Amino acid sequence: MNAVQVFLGAILVVLVYLFNVMVLRPRSLRAKLHRQGIHGPSPHFYFGNIPEMKTILLQSHSTQGKDKDKDRDIVSVSHNLTSTLFPHIQKWRNQYGPMYLFSSGSIQWLLVSDIEMVKEILMNTSLDLGKPSYLSKDMGPLLGEGILSSSGTIWAHQRKIIAPELYLDKVKAMVNLIVDSTNTKLRSWEARLESKGVVSEIRVDEDLRSLSADIIARTCFGSNYTEGKEIFTMLRDLQKILSNKHAGIPGFRYLPNKSNRQMWKLEKEINSKISKLIKQRQEETHDEQDLLQMILEGAKNYEVSDGLLSNSVSRERFMVDNCKNIFFAGHETTATTASWCLMLLASNQDWQDLARAEVLEVCGNGDPDASMLRNMKTSIKMLHLHLTMVIQETLRLYPPAVFVIRTALKDINLKGILIPKGMNIQIPIPVLQQDPQLWGPDAYKFNPERFANGVLGACKSPLAYMPFGQGARVCAGQHLAMAELKVILSLILLKFRFSLSSSYSHSPAFRLVVQPGQGVVLKMSKI
């Protein structure tokens, strides 16, 4: 066989593979749900419905741009994330109903926004519902096969190790450390105000991101937190690259283009730094029992003989990938939520005053540092009124993660619908958390009072509130996130008054999490 024949044979194999991946397999999956009465927009070859999604988004932005100058008052702005960021969902739900099919490249999706079907999915404890494989492939540089992207027995083992380290009792022990980190950052704000004048403008979102990075590095990685913080900048750059890519387009992640080369370089550097951090810890004599130590000890039992590892997952990768997952999820989501909280408090002065009065009552009128350090462990339980309501409403309007995603690892029956193996499920969190039928006619408005009687009293179905997910795969770090938010916001409220700068532009952006697209700039004065 000559070289030409070998080359032609290779081309044929690739074409057959692409035809199977892009045409035959998707057509088979969709046909099984078509026969059960579920439909959706027709996908294009290779790119699926991605071109149509982009077109709908551009049309929506064009319409919103014309209306933007008519309403400059953020208090009266609609916080409808679906229409702002995902107008294709709104259009296709109206056209095909609360469950419909669509595709992004070769990935086939069943979007589910029917609350009863959502309950069935979230409360399902079977390991036959897992996470889509694209998370560990297309998003592999950021997530690998850590707790956020793994499935089955591998995921169960990871959660068994990580979740107990983030239970409420463990989080309480981290409070003083969170206070220390926050006070250090706030002293830099005070210095800025002293140098620039009584009232100064501060862009808080970047500062909150670095603060959250410091907190997660200290609380989860102990004495190695300095090395841990260096990783955050690279993870942030990696996140920006991945947020501009569409998962599911075959071959794109292998192209040696500029963004992929940057991605590969960052992945290599991040993995190297985490491996170095792990090696340092293994060589040290210490008594730290932080999250890093738990991951290291859990890895000792992560043996091939236990049937937990695939051939491609080494013990080192188990440690590195879970460190990356915690670095990313542990600081990015909290920082973003804190930014949105401050934006909403800045534009709703009555709620800012109520929350500040509550914090003063809990923490006392003396030195804020001393009172917070002395009382925060008990205060954290008491801050269940205005401040917690503000946080809950912020998470309802601006959930950091916008989709709950699952994949059927085997054929599975959910409320009489057979979901075929290989079909992915997408639950749009903003749609459910801002549904007027579940939350009332003011569902798109900032109204923390709705949480006066907790989540159970806030809407018709408590499962419609899922900023941390629900069910078996609920976020393991939710207690740490809430503690961080309460401490950070409490200390800011004690030390500063703030309002929105005239330069603030309300522009939510989806970059793997929902962020203020042009930052949050506040006019601040010291109390």
Image (spheres, rainbow, N blue to C red):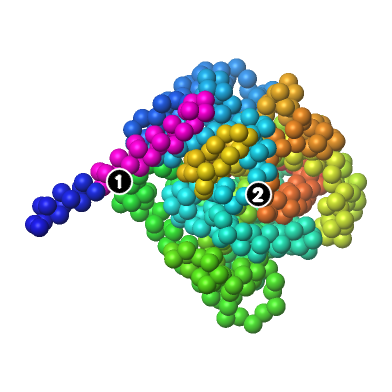
Q: Tag 2: residue type?
A: Thr
* Magenta extent: 14-39
Q: Is residue 220 above or below residue 29?
A: below
Please state which of residues 444 and 123 is positioned toward the viewer in this rendering: 123
Whole-percent x, y for residue 342 in the image: 70, 40
Q: In this picture, is 132 found above or below 72?
A: below
Total numbered labels: 2
Magenta span includes 464: no
Say which residue appears at 59% left-offset and 52% top-offset.
127
The mark found on residue 125 in the picture is: 2
Horizontal relation, residue 120 to residue 512: left or right: right
Q: In the image, residue 200 lies at what x, y percent? A: 68, 41
Q: Which residue is mark 1?
A: 17
Report x, y in % for residue 87. Answer: 53, 26
Dominant secondary structure of the magenta stretch?
Answer: helix
Q: Helix, strand or loop at disc 2?
A: loop
| Quadrant, the C terminus | top right
Of the residues shown, which amino acid type is indicated by label 1? Tyr
Q: Is residue 480 left or right of residue 34?
A: right
Do the residues under discs 1 and 2 have CB atoms within 8 angstroms?
no
Q: Residue at x 70, y 71 (%)?
A: 289
Q: Which mark is first along the chain, 2 or 1?
A: 1
Q: Is residue 474 left or right of residue 146?
A: right
